[in-house]
Image (tube, rainbow, N blue to C red):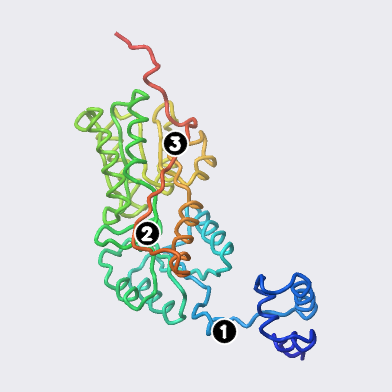
């Protein structure tokens, strides 16, 4: 079995010092281009791999961050992971991914576990059960930076990155109203999440300004997606004159589209549908769904860059960064404002 090649072995064969080899591998300007080339060629020949444990002891970093997610679904999360990995790779960091199964107890266990692994920082998307953040603060007090990603809690000022949920939902409400929809249904998720609170508030503000709040429109929160079929049954009965539905997420959008189609309702002829979306799911449905684009890639990239900058001492992670989400006009919203008025 071939022994592991070390920097000392490379230095001995090249007739130079280990420190020179180390600097050459790090592309240090103090080493000539000729020596850098010789070192890299020899390192490639022997398939030399740096000893990460030795580097960790020297730099007091592992160049590893942990990502803890409630679940890995087929909507927003894969693109967010892509953004996270892209930003991490750009800075020569690795990412360890864990799933909390949307359970607070599991989330708390994973935070303690990744702390024991001496990761340099943690990206955390909280569970639907997470209301108290004491378990997060406990780890932060040890010096491990934790940054919330996408789902920010309303009970603390923990740093994080998300889109401007209020503005996204506000603009969605305005778009529907400007297209002649006077009776709207807004469907939102878990009310304990700041994301839900902000998006509901934005949609409500839009309806208030357009004079639609008490005119046959409604807003409802669905804590579990399995509740949606029965919720829609009630909504379609009680608000039979509604012409458009807004959903705050891809998951709610896809299930709402399915339930409307299952009932024989046509989009947008019978009901218009609009959502806040990661921008992929709307194109898998017919017709393509008009949406406010919530880019998972951008959220993941921005959050990881912020966390790594903190680890490298370039900046702190005390603030919350809010990204703007653009409007994507597709085919799922009927323009009732363009229809002739029947007297």
The crowding category of the residue bearing disc 3, from other C-alpha atoms within 10 Å (few below 14, some 14 to 19, many at least 20), is: some
The reply to whether callout 2 and callout 3 are in contact (CB within 8 Å) is no
Location of residue 32 by image quarter: bottom right
Residue located beneath label 2 in the image: 160
Quadrant of the rendered image containing residue 49: bottom right
Q: Which residue is mark 1?
A: 53
Few, some or many residues within 10 Å of mark 2 (<14, 14–19, 20+): many
Q: Nearer the viewer, mark 3 or mark 1?
A: 1
* Residue that appears at 30% across and 32% down: 184
Q: Secondary structure at mark 1?
A: helix
Q: Label 3, label 1: how many angstroms apart (C-alpha)?
A: 47 Å
Seen from the viewer's position, the closer of residues 280 and 242 is 280
| Residue 299, x across and y down, in percent | 45, 53
Q: Position of residue 149 (x, y in %)?
A: 40, 59
Mark drawn on residue 135: none
Q: Residue at x 36, y 38 (%)?
A: 246
Q: Residues within 10 Å of mark 1 (few under 14, many from 20)?
A: few
Q: CA distance from mark 2 to mark 1?
A: 30 Å
Nearer the observer: mark 2 or 3; the answer is: 2
Residue 75 shows up from this direction: no
Label 3: element kind: strand
Q: Which residue is mark 3?
A: 327
Which image quadrant: the C terminus? top left
Q: Is residue 138 above or below residue 245?
A: below
Q: Residue at x 76, y 75 (%)?
A: 35
CA separation in Å, label 2 and label 3? 23 Å
Residue 61 in the image, given as x and y percentages of width and height:
50, 77
Earlier sequence position, callout 2 versus callout 1: 1
Instruction: Looking at the picture, tell me which residue is in the foreground, 151 or 4.
Output: 4
């Amino acid at each position: 079995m071939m022994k592991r090649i070390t920097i000392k072995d490379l230095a001995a064969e090249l007739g130079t010092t280990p420190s020179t080899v180390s600097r050459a591998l790090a592309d240090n300007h103090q080493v000539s281009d000729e020596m850098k080339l010789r070192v890299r060629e020899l390192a490639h020949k022997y398939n030399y791999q740096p000893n990460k444990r030795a580097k960790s002891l020297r730099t007091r970093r592992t160049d590893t961050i942990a990502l803890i997610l409630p679940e890995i679904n087929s909507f927003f999360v894969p693109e967010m992971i892509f953004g996270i990995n892209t930003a991490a790779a750009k800075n020569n960091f690795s990412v360890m991914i864990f799933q909390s199964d949307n359970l607070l107890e599991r989330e708390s266990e994973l935070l303690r576990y990744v702390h024991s692994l001496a990761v340099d920082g943690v990206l955390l998307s909280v569970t639907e059960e997470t209301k108290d953040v004491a378990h997060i603060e406990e780890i932060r007090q040890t010096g491990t930076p934790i940054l919330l990603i996408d789902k920010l809690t309303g009970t603390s000022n923990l740093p994080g990155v998300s889109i401007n949920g209020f503005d996204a939902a506000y603009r969605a409400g305005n778009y529907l109203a400007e297209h002649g929809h006077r009776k709207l249904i807004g469907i939102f998720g878990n009310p304990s999440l700041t994301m839900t609170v902000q998006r509901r508030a934005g949609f409500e503000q839009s309806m208030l300004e357009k004079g639609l709040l008490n005119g046959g429109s409604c807003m409802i929160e669905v804590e579990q997606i399995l509740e949606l079929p029965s919720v829609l049954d009630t909504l379609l009965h009680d608000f039979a004159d509604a012409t458009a539905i807004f959903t705050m997420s891809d998951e709610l959008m896809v299930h709402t589209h399915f339930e409307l189609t299952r009932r024989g309702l046509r989009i947008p002829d019978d009901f218009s549908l609009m959502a806040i979306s990661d921008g992929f799911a709307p194109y898998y449905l017919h017709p393509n769904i008009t949406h406010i684009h919530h880019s998972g890639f951008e959220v993941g990239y921005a959050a990881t860059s912020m966390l790594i900058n903190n680890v490298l001492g370039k900046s702190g992670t005390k603030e919350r960064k809010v990204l703007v989400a653009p409007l994507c006009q597709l085919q799922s919203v009927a323009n009732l404002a363009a229809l002739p008025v029947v007297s």
